[in-house]
Amino acid sequence: MTDVCTIAAISLDSGISKEVLRKWEERYGFPGPERDASGHRVYAVHQTARLKLIKRLIDNGMRPSQLVPLSEEALQSLLDEQSIINSVPAMESQVVDELMALLQLHDRSALDDRLKQEVKRLGVEKFVMEVMCPLNGAVGTAWVQGKIGIRDEHVYSEMIQSLIREEISQVSKPDGWPRMLITTPSGELHTLGILMVNVLASLHSACCISLGPQTPIQEIPIAAADYRADIVCLCFSAAFPKRKILPYLKELRSVVPQNVEIWIGGAGAVGLDRSPRGIRLLLTLHEVTDAVRNYGRAKYSQRQRRPANGLRSNTES
């Protein structure tokens, strides 16, 4: 057999886990493997392009059941119709195009300078909302379409992370409130989500304690106690197996004290059929900033309802 690859290779190239590929094969008949002399799955290399399109559309909030049965042409049409870029102001859409051109030219210095200029022009909050979010989408789309390589995506990722970390260092509030512990679960490598939440929540007076990615579940309640967290915030990318999210959240809620809120978000959380009791689902960055702003008001209102003798009222039980 020629032009074939292993399930590990196609998983790495497409960003879709091996277990999900097997599930789709069983449920939808795609991707369709052949078998080598040892009986192991091998996949035609040309299937990778279709898988990449599916991955990008799932990242944008669509369900696998809507996408996997579609042809490559139909998937590309859907991707072309996505409004990631068109939903931002026209000027920022042009900025995203110009930044993408610099990335494709491999002009790292010019790209770095331009990103910093845009942060200075817009301020970090508008930059994250109006430039970084659509730019992340544009980079992913360009990779799916073969306009950039994975090496270019890595260059962008390193550059944007460095930029946002620098902004975080300037706006962090060690004495802020609420106190937010931010991380991803074990197996979730993506860090852009937690960085964006960190900088935006800091701008709205939160004290953010980032544990970075992949914190073991048993460490989270310990960290919440050590750092006196009011909120544990987790980000899930679309690459995280969706079937694992609900069991994970139920276990997390059982070990984190009930007085500590749990917030989740990210592309992986889009389309969840339900959310366990005591888990707050925030699907956009605007929802995150609104939740941070409103947290203090809600707690103040609860304190106002507390009886003078210090006992909890029925509404708080």
Image (cartoon, rainbow, N blue to C red):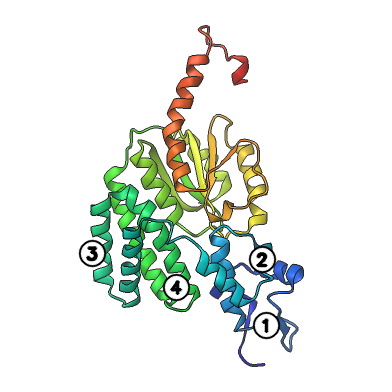
Rounded to the nearest angstrom, the CA distance separating label 4 from label 3 is 21 Å
- Ranked by sequence position, the earlier of labels 4 and 2 is 2
Disc 1 marks which amino acid?
Val
- Note whether residue 9 is visible: no
Image location (x, y in percent) of residue 127: 33, 53
Q: Secondary structure at mark 3?
A: helix
Q: Contact (CB < 8 A) between labels 1 and 3?
A: no
Residue that carries the numbered disc 2 in the rendered image: 20
Which residue lies under the disc numbered 3?
113
Quick one: label 1 or label 2, which is nearer the N terminus?
2
Work out whether mark 2 precedes mark 3 in sequence or the reverse, and give the earlier one.
Answer: 2
First of labels 4, 1 by sequence position: 1
Q: Secondary structure at mark 4?
A: helix
Tag 4 residue: 142
Q: Relative to 217, say whether 3 is above or below.
A: below
Labels 4 and 2 touching (C-beta < 8 A): no
Q: Calculate the distance from the C-alpha at mark 1 to the C-alpha at mark 3.
A: 44 Å
Quadrant the N terminus occupies: bottom right
Looking at the picture, how far across and down is residue 263, in whole percent?
53, 41
